[in-house]
Image (cartoon, rainbow, N blue to C red):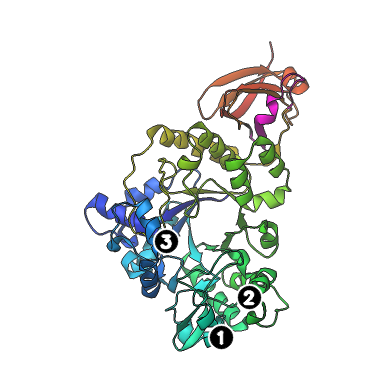
Amino acid sequence: MTVIYEINTLVWLGELSARYGRRTTLGDVPGEVWDEIALPGIDTVWLMGVWERSPAGLHIALRDEGLRASFHEALPDVTEADIAGSPYCVRNYVVDASLGGPEGLAAARAQLAARGLGLILDYVPNHVAPDHPWLTAHPDHLVQGTADDLAHAPNAFLEAGGQIYARGRDPYFPPWPDVVQLNAFSDELRAATVDTLVSIGDQADGVRCDMAMLLMNDIFAKTWGDRAGKLPAEDFWPHVIPRVRAHHPDLLFVAEAYWDLEHSLQEQGFDHCYDKRLYDRLLHENADSVRGHLQADIAYQQGLVRFLENHDEPRAAATLPGARERAAAVAVATLPGATLWHEGQFEGRRVRLPVFLSRGPREPADAPLRDFYGRLLPAAAAVRRGDWRPLTPTGWPDNDTHRSLLAWTWTHEDARHLVVVNYSDRPAQARLPLPWDGLRGHEHRLTDLLTDGTYDRRGDELADAGLFVSLEAWQCHVFVVNGHSPAP
């Protein structure tokens, strides 16, 4: 199962340059650094933000008071030299020369492949920078406006290359000031998208598509109406993805997706879609809510991306402090589907850095949290094999704390694992009905992969009443269940 590690490429290379006392690009990252990234269970690295950033977009960002305030909040000593522009304001899908160019990326990909790791890169299907070549060479790729539009709504339109274009947006927020809207209904844009994704597939093993749901026919029509032109008979992604896969059959497609459109995007060809619903429930709701979410069809769940943070969300250490983060991390790490970890998450970084910045603040590492993740990652890699099954904890009339527990099993032909998470701030007890045959007549040892603690239980009790568990607030167990010796 896919486990992705996201790296803010520009910031990371700056930190490596400081660490080694020399300018470091993707082409000359030391081997020991790639070794540090190749953590147990991680099989894919997302180098976020490698494409050419836009000078025009940077100029807009430098004049935006709201953006500059966010820069100062994250990095109090920020200077203009630290502001690089947004990696999602793409001038061209060519690796930025400051990062090492295409040759540097190829070297990085080879280093990752030598360690058994794939590479994911970004694609921004909804918009481009105001100085992207398409604005002058292919205006039919974009949503266009009129001089009256610009006069009446200068925040929603801009002039470039003698043409008026709509600024990029989604239907629920004001336009983004630094990007220009692509036209998902344009045949020419769809063909260009295929070409661009084929080019990305030449350089990587997967692509993370930014705000992928914005290009769906019904969403795009709702956002742009008549400006987009005639509604195509075929939706955007079912048109694009098969044509890309004709060149790169194994290219992994990951969708940033919201608004409960994950299943629709899976049906339209994506391998994995963000599970924002689980993220919200872990942050703001309780175990009952999470348990309900996990009743969904297993095929759907296998197409989700579980996460606690990424570059668009606050840091987990800031929003899920202490033991609650550990409990949530155990859940996302051991569920079916893909897992997304974010650079700095394991060390407990708390500052969400705006993607415009090339430097972040210095933050001390949280050594106990780092040690916890050092045990969780190999435990999750061992657990997530075979068949997954959610369990329903049971309790007693005078004790409803079982409702605070999340539990599931993984069953493989050579291993049985059990995960139990107390997702509450109070102690909880329950019986867990186990799905395994052959429990009777044997003593079974449960070894916690997070603590090395062991528990011996009689098989007849496990088969009849289920496993009794008692956990403190936010406590977790990740058990491997062994033993076939006759019970005394």
Where residue 87 sits, quadrant-wise, is: bottom left
Which numbered disc flags the more N-terminal residue, 2 or 1?
Answer: 1
Name the secondary structure under disc 3.
Answer: helix
> Dot 2, crowdedness within 10 Å: few (<14), some or many (≥20)?
some
Quadrant, the C terminus: top right
Return the x and y of residue 40 as percentages of the image width and height. Answer: 47, 42
Q: CA distance from mark 2 to mark 1?
A: 15 Å
In the rendered image, which residue does mark 1 sit on? 140
Name the residue type under label 2.
Answer: Trp
> Dot 1, crowdedness within 10 Å: few (<14), some or many (≥20)?
some
The residue that appears at 44% across and 44% down in the rendered structure is: 345
The residue that appears at 43% across and 47% down in the rendered structure is: 38
In the picture, the disc for residue 66 is: 3
Magenta-tinted stretch: 394-419
Q: In this image, 221 relative to 317: left or right?
A: right
Which residue sits furthest left?
Answer: 21
Where residue 97 sits, quadrant-wise, is: bottom left
Name the residue type under label 1.
Answer: Asp
Which numbered disc flags the more N-terminal residue, 3 or 2?
Answer: 3
> Looking at the image, is mark 1 or mark 3 nearer the viewer?
3
Q: CA distance from mark 1 to mark 3?
A: 32 Å
In the rendered image, which residue does mark 2 sit on? 224
